[in-house]
Image: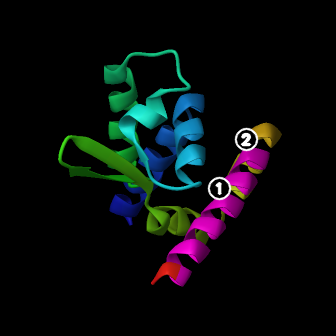
């Protein structure tokens, strides 16, 4: 149980930053290279990589390097486990953050689309 709690803490820590949430929202639309993810942000590539590393450590994102390109994608299992534990949007509502709760519901909808697309591709 302690291990699951630590993993959940890492997920919430990763989702606490607006830049990481934006990266995750972008990845819900489909896989993207690190360069593509970095494009809309006014930050250095090493800073983007640190954000992605935190998202990876939380289990929300996975990356794969093919040749010189590192491609990132959403790890839907991790997001499902958050939902299984009562829901991210419910947690945020209890914490009193309606705006983040709304974003969590949108993210949940986007994740459902990704899962559906993955299931139909299989």
Residue drawn 74% across and 56% down? 105
Q: Considering depth in this image, is 81 or 22 the residue closer to the camera?
A: 22
Q: Considering depth in this image, is 27 or 18 the residue closer to the camera?
A: 27
Where residue 61 sits in the image (x, y, percent)? 41, 52
Residue drawn 54% across and 69% down? 80
Looking at the image, residue 80 lies above or below residue 26: below
Q: Is residue 25 left or right of residue 95?
A: left
Does 14 appear in magenta?
Answer: no
Which residues lie in the magenta part? 101-120
Name the magenta segment's main secondary structure.
helix
Where residue 43 sits in the image (x, y, percent)? 45, 16
Residue drawn 66% across and 54% down? 107
On the rendered image, what quadrant is the C terminus found in? bottom left
Q: Is residue 65 left or right of residue 56?
A: left
Q: Considering depth in this image, is 89 or 43 the residue closer to the camera?
A: 43
On the rendered image, what quadrant is the N terminus found in? bottom left
Packing grade of label 2 (10 A; few <14, some 14-19, many >=20) is many
Label 2 sits on residue: 100
Label 1 sits on residue: 88
Does dot 2 land on a helix, a strand or a loop?
A: helix
**Picture quarter containing residue 68?**
top left
Does dot 1 land on a helix, a strand or a loop?
A: helix
Q: Is residue 63 left or right of residue 93?
A: left
């Amino acid at each position: 149980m302690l291990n699951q709690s630590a993993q959940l803490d890492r997920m919430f820590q990763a989702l606490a930053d607006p830049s990481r949430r934006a990266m995750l929202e972008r990845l819900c639309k489909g896989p993207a290279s690190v360069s593509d993810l970095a494009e809309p942000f006014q930050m250095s590539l090493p800073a983007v990589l640190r954000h992605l590393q935190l998202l990876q450590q939380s289990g929300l994102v996975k990356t794969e390097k093919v040749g010189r390109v590192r491609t990132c994608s959403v790890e839907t299992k991790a997001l499902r486990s958050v939902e299984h534990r009562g829901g991210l949007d419910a947690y945020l509502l209890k914490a009193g953050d309606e705006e983040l709760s709304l974003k969590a519901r949108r993210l949940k909808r986007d994740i459902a689309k990704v899962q559906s697309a993955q299931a139909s591709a299989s």
